[in-house]
Image (spheres, rainbow, N blue to C red):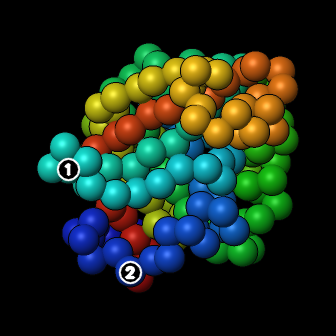
Amino acid sequence: MLKRMDPKALNENVFSMLADQWMLVTAGTPENCNTMTASWGGLGVLWGKNVAMCVIRPQRYTRELLEQGEYYTLSFFGGERRDALALCGRESGRDVDKVKACGFTVAAAAGNAPYFEEARLVLVCRKLYRQDLDADCFTDSSLDEKWYPGKDYHRMYIGEIVEVLKRD
């Protein structure tokens, strides 16, 4: 069972959580949501608030739902769900019901944000800021060349962490 906790009590290795374990970014409502795998992001303090940052490419269905709502979630799982996370990164929610395919149970968090009961950690975020990345943003042009050959730049979202749910 997931229980609320203070964000400042998190003692996770953020770099490993994002780069090695991946996360699911989920947006929409509990009745109509989509999720996608992400391994880029960050956690910190900005504008006096605990925040999470993620980036999403324009073609992702999750981005459409994220634009429509005020809240979204970032969910982290144990290694036993690696295949499900891979599916959520490989398939589009326009073509596949990823929630059903992965056997996830959708629940509602603060702001009616959808999350998955199978997660070990959930960060519930309220959108504060969004910014499209573009070639002019890079002070190191090699990053633009390596990560954006098709010029399908991510949109960066910064959200206030309004609730943290963690498995006992």
The type of residue carrying mark 1 is: Lys
Q: Quadrant of residue 164?
A: bottom left
Find disc 1 in the rendering and name its residue: 49
Q: Secondary structure at mark 2?
A: loop
Is disc 1 surrounded by few (<14), some (14 to 19) or many (20+) residues within 10 Å? few
Q: Which residue is drawn at the image coordinates 27% and 66% (left, top)? A: 7
Residue 14 lies left or right of residue 141; in this view the side is left
- In-front residue for pair 106/40: 40
Image quadrant in which you'd find residue 138: top right
Question: Where's residue 104, x and y in %?
Answer: 64, 53
Task: Find disc 2 in the rendering and name its residue.
Answer: 11
Q: Is residue 64 above or below residue 161?
A: above
Q: Residue at x 61, y 50 (%)?
A: 40
Q: Residue at x 66, y 63 (%)?
A: 19
Classify mark 2: residues with Cα within 10 Å, few (<14), some (14-19) or many (20+): few
Q: Quadrant of the N terminus?
A: bottom left
| Amino acid type, label 2 | Asn
Check contact, mark 2 vs mark 1: CB within 8 A.
Answer: no
Q: Nearer the viewer, residue 138 or 28?
A: 138
Q: Position of residue 24 (x, y in %)?
A: 60, 50
Report, in whole angstroms, how far the alpha carbon at label 2 lies from the one at label 1. 18 Å
**In which quadrant is the C terminus drawn?**
bottom left
**From the viewer's perspective, is residue 131 above or below residue 27?**
above
Q: Horizontal and vertical percent for residue 64?
A: 57, 18
What residue is at 74 percent from the left and 74 percent from the top? 80
Q: Position of residue 20 (x, y in %)?
A: 69, 68
